[in-house]
Amino acid sequence: MKKTLLTLFLCSALISHYGMSQTIIDTFSGSGAPDSSKWTYAKPYADSNVYQSGGYLNLLNRGTLFSKNEFGSYIEISGSMKFTGSSKDNIRLFLRTDKYMTPSNASSQLTHGIQIGFAPGYGAGISEFYGFPAGSDKPSDPDGWEPLAGTTGSGYFSMNVEETFKVTDDGYTINLFLRNMNTPVATATSNLRYGGFFAIQNREGGLGGSWESNGSNVAINSLTIVPEPSALSLLAVGLGGMAMLRRRRS
């Protein structure tokens, strides 16, 4: 009896810690800096910014948002966003990252982890990023990154049009969903992992050395980040069954 109760208590504590304390749900309804209990951020250039306004979180000229806490191997990310600045902008979602960014004289780019990128009028892609420039973890590859998968279609994002997205990652298989949340537009596999942070950043502007994308701005309407729901649900069902069985026997 005591052993069963102890098992139930420990499993419940795990669900509480990993299924609740690390869940992020944000509709960015405030103003000014993002919620410090959920996020940290970086503004690498004088014209970079990360701020809430009008129900959106804006990333301006390489503004970068990080999850405050790290996640485990299983994660699901969903949300909606739109490009409102330069048509030369792009957005990069980073999974499994340690938040390492190149110096400001090298574009302040996130370079460790799994990158999912898309831009106005183009398709989307999933890539491994393991250091830039050369001489890092895979010195045989001078680019410091490796494309894994791309979408068959293009033009998922247009200027000033809000689109939904979802990313699932079980620690090996990464799925990207755009518009249709039931069928992925790209799937890739990778064991690469530097850390457990999630990050999102857009392209640098003029003071970051890219005048063609000056005024880059991504407006994020919402972000939800949770541990893989199916694993937690199965554990919860199992615990409930154990508890009911124990009551019937006692």
Image (tube, grey):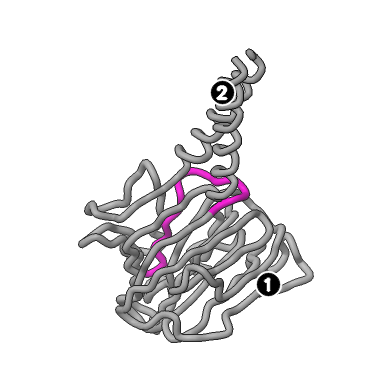
Q: Is residue 12 shown to the viewer in this render?
A: yes
Disc 2: which residue: 9
Q: Main secondary structure of the magenta part?
A: loop
Find the residue positioned furthest to the front.
248
The structure residue drawn at horizontal position 49% and vertical position 33%, both measured from the top left corner, is: 16
Whether residue 70 appears in magenta in the rendering, the answer is yes
The structure residue drawn at horizontal position 39% and vertical position 57%, both measured from the top left corner, is: 223
**In front here: 150 or 178?**
178
- Check if mark 1's residue and mark 2's residue have beta carbons within 8 Å: no
Percent of width and height locating residue 180: 46, 73
Quadrant for residue 44, please give it. bottom left
Percent of width and height locating residue 5: 59, 19
How far apart marks 1 and 2 lie (CA) works out to: 44 Å
Judged by depth in the image, the label closer to the viewer, 1 or 2, is 2
The quadrant of the image that shows the C terminus is top right
The structure residue drawn at horizontal position 59% and vertical position 30%, both measured from the top left corner, is: 11
**In front here: 208 or 95?**
95
Few, some or many residues within 10 Å of mark 1 (<14, 14–19, 20+): some
Give me the disc on residue 226.
Answer: none
Q: Secondary structure at mark 2?
A: helix
Disc 1: which residue: 146
**In front here: 170 or 9?**
9
Few, some or many residues within 10 Å of mark 2 (<14, 14–19, 20+): few
Q: Which residues are magenta?
A: 61-75
The structure residue drawn at horizontal position 54% and vertical position 72%, both measured from the top left corner, is: 183
The quadrant of the image that shows the N terminus is top right
Above or below 210: residue 115: above
